[in-house]
Image (spheres, helix red, strand yellow):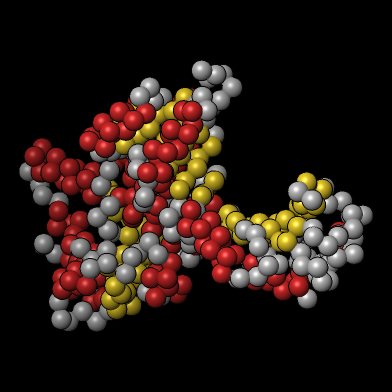
Amino acid sequence: MRVVIVGCGRVGSLLALRMAGEGHTVCVIDEKPSSFERLGDDFNGEMVVGNGLEGATLRRAGIEKADCFAAVMPGDNRNLMAAQLAREIFNVKRVITRIYDPIRAAVYREMGVETICSTVIGAGLIHDYLIDGVNRADAVAGAGGRT
Amino acid sequence: MNQRTTPYVIVIGGGKVGYHLARHLLDRGYEVTLVEKDRVRAQWLSHQLGSCSIMVGDGDEMSFLATTGIERAGVVVGATGDDEDNLVACQLAKRKFSVPRTIARVNDPENVRLFKALGIDVPVSATELLMGLIEAELSGSDAVKGVAVKACGATLVDVALPELSSLVGRRVADVHLPAGDLVVCIVRDGRPVVPQADVVIQPGDELIIYSTTLDVESVRELVTN
């Protein structure tokens, strides 16, 4: 698959490395060139420096040919806008975004924008460990393993 | 106060645009709430605007929006300097609070299309307006002395016809514009003339053309050839 990831922070870089490792064609966008250091030297995907909310940047990253798109920048609103750009303007089939605010995550999910709320998931996992003593974080992390 | 006839307006973002907009609306008798994130800026705003209700908070936070009386608002304006914040504030207003009309300031002109597609009623791009004005000035032509106002994908071009224009002497019906484009008004001796099919275009007329396909340059070519 061809994937475009906007935001090369902790989540973006981990995701990019994992998907590139699985043989997917990956392009990561970030405004700060230094963010790409998180990918290490062995990353075989593409890196594009620029604003992930700008059509020109997204095109440079090959969004027109992308099968899937993930918005994982620090700001919820930036992610929501990027995701909707990918869906509405570039017709990317599978689009998802990470959102911190549970309410916003729920509202946009209702509107058809797929969201993952890391706050809700984190709180849920911690809750489960406190209640039944089982840490399910490894299961969620999948083949990515422990962080 | 004439609250019954004018809608309650919520303006999000108390920067220069939001501040002047709120002041303008207040002067016209609107009920306005100006929402500003920054406490210090909000204090300054309430000094300037007095009676206007300034609220300190996050315009795209649902729980905060619920405290602004948004359910009875007629219009919500996203006026911050960040397109993503204006978009989300307007979408929440529309989807969750059923606000009938949402207006978003659009800083990157390319986003006008996206905002339209996402249901924002009126995306306003100041950049595009300025570009249109400057473009018209740069064309340096007497023919198109006017303004290209690009909004929502359409352009209003104000064309002062040159004496030798091929359009002079023709009926409005015989002015061939691309499909969907329209002469919306003729200004003759400083007065508007309704451009009915039979009206004959005269030297010195000024045409106001609504166009979704032309830019200032093509209009210039059209009227001077």
Split into 4 quadrants, where in the image is the C terminus of chain B? Answer: bottom right
**Left or right for B153, reference A93:** right
Q: Residue at x 21, y 79 (%)?
A: A43
Is residue A72 depicted above or below A124 in this figure?
A: below
Count of marks overlaid on the render: 0
**Left or right for B111, reference B48:** right
- Among the 4 quarters of the image, the one containing residue A140: bottom left
Near-viewer residue (B51 or B102): B51
Near-viewer residue (A95 or A50): A50
On the image, the x and y values in percent for residue B152 come to 58, 54
Is residue B105 depicted above or below B225 in this figure?
A: above
Near-viewer residue (A87 or B16): B16
Q: Residue at x 35, y 34 (%)?
A: B35
Viewer can see residue B66: no
Viewer can see residue A130: yes
On the image, the x and y values in percent for residue A137 come to 14, 53
Is residue B122 depicted above or below A49 in this figure?
A: above
Q: Residue at x 51, y 50 (%)?
A: B124
On the image, the x and y values in percent for residue A65 come to 45, 74
On the image, the x and y values in percent for residue A42 come to 17, 81
- Among the 4 quarters of the image, the one containing residue A2: bottom left
Is residue B96 depicted above or below A69 in this figure?
A: above
Q: Residue at x 38, y 61 (%)?
A: A53
- Among the 4 quarters of the image, the one containing residue B204: bottom right
